[in-house]
Amino acid sequence: MADLYSQLMRMPVTSTVGKKIGLPQPVELARGSSEVGGRVLLGGAGRVAEAAARVLKAMGADSATALDDPVRESAARAGLDAAVFNPEAPADQKFRALVFDATGIVDSAGLVELQRFFYPTVGRLQRSGRVVVLGDGRRALEGFTRSLGKEVGPRGVTVNLVHVDEGAEDQLAPTLRFLLTPRSAYVSGQVIQVGSGSERPVAGRTALVTGGSRGIGAAIADVLEREGATVVRLDLKDADVELDITAPEAPEVLAERFADGLDILVHNAGVTKDRTLAKMPEDRWQSLMEVNLLAPERLTDALLPVLRDDGRIVCVSSMAAIAGNAGQTNYATSKAGLIDLVTGLSLERGITANAVAPGFIETAMTAAMPVGVREVGRRLNSLRQGGLPVDVAETVAWLAGSGVDRNVVRVCGQSLLGA
């Protein structure tokens, strides 16, 4: 589902004209596959390299390393049969993904290793390619990955940084799989923390998705079902459970409905009631807050006791929560409050909580925007286009299956607004 501008820019004549006058040239993003779709070059040397090589081996990914790169020994220990990459090879030798283990960089002088690896390789990335840098908390890597993402984003390439806690190397697999495949098409410029939490596949688990009858919520439910979950869609109508989540009895009703146990809780239901603060009466503020924040807080309190071991809570926040938005003080406050909910919960039994923060997603709501505002929203990111509901859904499904905890992941094509 491409917007009209993107369709025009993919036609030969209009594309040529657009390039000459400097118009954005959005690339059609690869989606819908759990395969890498091409060769992966692994580089760097540190404590995460061998774990990354094991993930590539398990994925059956066509892989390569430079002959003189210490990572080649890590790949061999992992049983990864990696081809040899020669930086002097013809430029038509391309990669679908570059993975660099930066945990071996021990001081600022060592940051030159980033230049040494990416200088001869980043130009060889195919369209819709992937770059994943594996780190250990060094902030310099954030500046590098976010800047690189803005350089290569116009080609549909995403760049993300994964900090891996010491001792959590074996928990890298679900996150690296997600970031290397088309499932992460609209996730770029993100910093993800992998801790000791264990992967728990979605298949065979029970999920509740609020606001699940249409838009992003319906896409989340569809993807979770595709992954093998039994999904209960909650909404005001056309849903498995038709319920007003702001009703006083809603927490008790749902706790009783899932008395036998719940595995995945997705807080997606939300509304907008835009108006500048000077024109926003209290009832308009509070009615939105009831749906977007207070109801999720109450439902979480009621459902935590029935959430099974290794349960997952995922909140759908918004870029407005991070960057702010004129005329949306109520909405931004409520969606930022969901991030507070995720980071402030006291959890045990392997339960995790995370949030996704969508940017400009092509929905009925964005389709109703004035054309000028809509076009700016679409282009104001590194990928130069809006995302799709399925992009948010794929990210929710990854969080629901992985063991990562307390992450806020923007699904925004690396929006140029906000952090």
Image: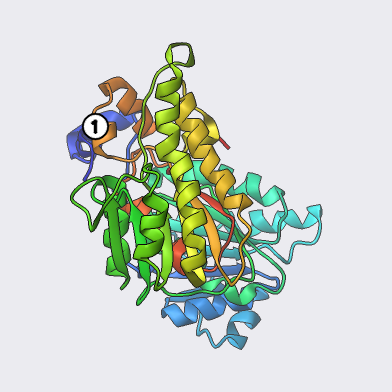
Q: Residue drawn at (45%, 28%), measured in percent from left and top?
A: 286
Q: Residue drawn at (31%, 48%), measured in percent from left and top?
A: 211
> Would you say 375 lies left or right of 196 here?
left
Residue 44 visible? The answer is yes
> Would you say 230 lies left or right of 304 here?
left
Residue placed farthest to the top in the image? 278
Front residue of this view, candidates 320 and 280: 280
Front residue of this view, candidates 252 and 75: 252
Q: Amino acid at mark 1?
A: Ala
Q: Residue drawn at (41%, 56%), measured in percent from left and top?
A: 252
Instruction: Report which residue position mark 1 lands on.
Output: 367
Q: Quadrant of residue 331?
A: top left
Relative image position of residue 85 (x, y in whole percent): 52, 72
Relative image position of residue 64 (x, y in whole percent): 50, 74
Residue 177 visible? The answer is no
Please identify the quadrant where the N terminus is shown. Answer: top left
Q: Residue drawn at (35%, 77%), measured in percent from left and top?
A: 204
Is the residue 288 above or below the residue 408 in the image? above
Front residue of this view, candidates 410 and 290: 290
Q: Quadrant of residue 182?
A: bottom left
**Is disc 1 surrounded by few (<14), some (14 to 19) or many (20+) residues within 10 Å?**
few
Please identify the quadrant where the C terminus is shown. Answer: top right
Is the residue 357 above or below the residue 69 in the image? above
